[in-house]
Amino acid sequence: MAVTAAVFIGSEIYRGSSYGGAHPLRVPRVSTVMDLARALGWLEGCYRTSPRAKPAALLAFHTAEYIAALQAAEAGEIDAAAMARHHLGTLSNPIFPQIYRRPATGAGGVLLASKLLAGGGAVHVPGGGTHHGLPDRANGFCYLNDPVLAIVALRRMGLRVAYVDLDAHHCDGVEFAFAGVPEVLLISVHEDARWPFTGALGVAAGNCVNLPVPAQYNDSEARMVLQEMILPRLQWFAPQVIVLQAGADALLEDPLSRLALSNNAYVEALRAIKGLAPRLMLLGGGGYNPWSVGRCWTLLWAELSGQEVPDRLPEAAQAVLRALNWGGGGRPLPAPALLTTLRDAPREGPIRDELRARVAVLARA
């Protein structure tokens, strides 16, 4: 199944589906991207509805017992012992009405994307990117690990896979799955001293390149990391497919990190990376400010699909952004620019010596 133009995979399950009123994922994200892209006329002829992955497909990484526990939790039939064993019903991983269907839809989206990429092309799956999930338990808001499932599917096609993760949080579940697998290159740029407190500086198991970055990481620093660390590694590895996890929690406005990027840094990364392999899968991931994450992932779709980004959004797109809210919590409303534009003002800054030293360590590894 070949792709000749970029494809967007979404689902209505994300509209109104929430982890609960006290959870950071109470905010709309994928539905916001769908609504913004539609308001801009950017989904015509390229939108595909994500299927729900069947339980058998999830066994490529997850245990049968855990999949059964998720289904039981959704049906309201899980017992306390199973909840404890699989880390369900916690503050981070609550039981909510779509606890199985929603992550299974994200997994179905990346599995469809993998099939579409067999002949080349680019696919955006903003509902994907749940990179913390472990084989037998939920972890860090992630019930299933769709990046792992995608990479397994791509590897079954015989493809060399590079996985690049820009999320503020380290991709512990993906590293668990592929550490030491020479046909998979993992590159993670994540905030230092931030949950899950994995991903120490260095190259783990020979193929997992981890760069923890300091708080207030800015666009200038991200450009240096891209040019001096990410791109050389990708060029050396020569992947046949790149999976780019674009968790938007490294943006300045995000409440769950201390990083300071603009969405321009994400666009620069995608623009530089997308030509380095004949296939690219773009995923979502973290991101807990509904305005900044919606704008970022829509902007990345524009880059992937070759759309012209207006300096000021049309009224229909502005209405999408004005309708958003935090869903409680008393956080301040966004700056006016977040309601009228897609592209942030640049957030350049000094390139700190400590970051240069960490990049130099990786160059020697």
Image (cartoon, rainbow, N blue to C red):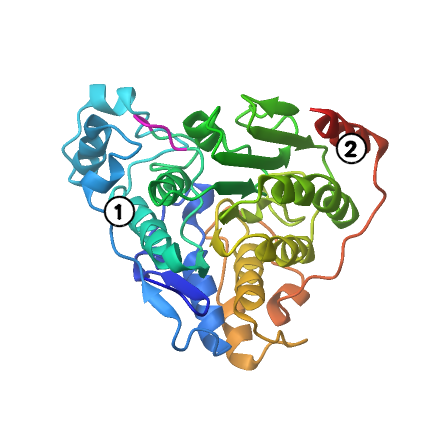
Q: Could you tell me how many numbered marks the image carries?
A: 2
The picture places residue 365, in percent across and down from the top left corner, at 69, 24
Q: Is mark 2 on a helix, strand or loop?
A: helix
Foreground pick, 63 / 69: 63
Q: Dot 1, how many residues are within 10 Å of its Cα: few (below 14), some (14-19), or many (20+)?
A: some
Q: In this view, does 191 lie above or below 270?
A: above
Q: Which residue is drawn at 62% across and 38% down?
A: 257
Is residue 134 rendered magenta in the image?
yes
Q: What stretch is highlighted in magenta?
A: 133-137
The picture places residue 42, in percent across and down from the top left corner, at 48, 75
Q: Can residue 259 be seen in this view?
A: no
Is residue 219 rendered magenta in the image?
no
- Circle 1 sits on which residue? 98
Q: Which residue is drawn at 34% across and 37% down?
A: 144
- Circle 2 sits on which residue? 355
Q: What element carries label 1?
A: loop
Q: Can residue 232 be seen in this view?
A: yes
Q: Which residue is drawn at 59% across and 53% down?
A: 276
Main secondary-structure element of the magenta-colored stretch = loop
The label on residue 171 is none
Indicate which disc, 1 or 2, sits on the residue closer to the N terminus.
1
Q: Dot 2, how many residues are within 10 Å of its Cα: few (below 14), some (14-19), or many (20+)?
A: some
Q: In this view, does 214 lie above or below 11?
A: above
The picture places residue 9, in percent across and down from the top left corner, at 37, 61
Indicate left or right for 107 with 299 as reference: left
CA gap between label 1 and label 2 equals 41 Å
Instruction: Tell me the quadrant of the picture where the N terminus can be found.
Output: bottom left
Q: Which residue is drawn at 44% across and 55% down?
A: 126
User: Which amino acid lies under the numbered mark 2 shown in the image of this protein?
Assistant: Leu
User: Which amino acid lies under the numbered mark 1 shown in the image of this protein?
Assistant: Gln
The picture places residue 87, in percent across and down from the top left corner, at 33, 25
Foreground pick, 119 / 176: 119
